[in-house]
Amino acid sequence: MQVEALSAVYGTSASDGGTIGEAAYGRIRADIVFGRLAPGQKLGLDRMRETYGAGISTLRELLSRLASEGLIVAEGQRGFEVAPVSDDDFREVTSLRLLLEAHAMEESFAAGGLDWEGGVVAAHHKLAALEHRLLAREDVDLEVWKRYDWEFHRALIAACGSKLLLQTHAAIYDRYLRYQMVAVVFRGEAAAEEHRRLLDSALARDSAAGRQALAEHLGNCVRHVLETGALGRFGSEARRSPADAVPPAGPRITRGERGGSRTSARPDATGRSRAPPSGG
């Protein structure tokens, strides 16, 4: 299974023809990216075997693979834990996403044809429709909303001509998305307007305007997270999770088409109720 941003979340399962290991990898990765496994949370292999349906040796391989992606920390004999979060790391991840995405947009704006334009418009239409519903406080599958957000940003750079650039951007996008999900970012109309500016710059083939819009889009999200101190609660609290903790099987979230949570308030990884995320 090709691993790109959100592909592990919306990719194949064992029943779709993938292996049990690949299906488990996708589920674990999704649980980390969407914050169902909290930053700093210890990962007990026995409970994970029950939850994800893979053997201990397979789980060790998968967790080592996720460690190479920066989503898991291997602690030698002490096992594995979900990678921590910090203000500095969020800034660094955001800076790298901006560097990669702005360059890819410049190449894509120059090379994209009519089909590319159509793909950008279609992706924005879906995203804007869900943003409108979010702003109206309607019931929305948040993980589908984030998939549409990904599809729009991916459409903007789809014609860049470099498969390696797309793959590298995809990996860093997921790490950025994890910060959005665990920090409970909600910027509403501001983010929707920034997406409209990105669309306009793409259709005008104005890479300078696109770079500026993207820089503000990402920068405003980081500022919001840092000003609210949303990451502070993961300093030591997450590390107090039981060693064999896994996502609870109870009614922590309302399931959508692919396990997506909906906009009704839900407990976070520490058990407290939290509002739906938004932003970009």
Image (cartoon, rainbow, N blue to C red):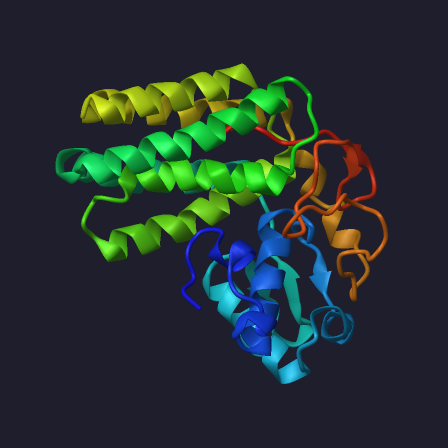
Image x and y of residue 206, in percent: 19, 23
For residue 135, side relative to residue 129 (left or right): right
Q: Residue lying at the far right in this picture: please name it.
A: 250
Along the line of sight, the residue nearer the viewer: 128 or 277: 128
Give residue 151's quadrant in the image.
top left
Residue 279 visible here? yes
Image x and y of residue 47, in percent: 78, 71
Name the residue located 48 percent from the left edge and 31 percent from the top edge: 127
For residue 155, side relative to residue 48 (left or right): left
Name the residue located 46 percent from the left edge and 60 percent from the top edge: 69
Give the tally of numbered discs. Answer: 0
Give residue 153's quadrant in the image.
top left
For residue 259, side relative to residue 179 (left or right): right
Image x and y of residue 275, in percent: 72, 29
Residue 227 visible here? no
In the displayed structure, 5 sits above or below 235; it is below
Image x and y of residue 250, in percent: 86, 53
> Looking at the figure, which quarter contains the N terminus?
bottom left
Name the residue located 49 percent from the left edge and 51 percent from the top edge: 6
In the displayed structure, 239 sits above or below 214; it is below
Along the line of sight, the residue nearer the viewer: 193 or 114: 114
Name the residue located 73 percent from the left edge and 53 percent from the top edge: 239
In the displayed structure, 211 sits above or below 164; it is above
Q: Residue lying at the far left in this picture: please name it.
A: 110
Give residue 102's quadrant in the image.
top left
Along the line of sight, the residue nearer the viewer: 77 or 26: 26
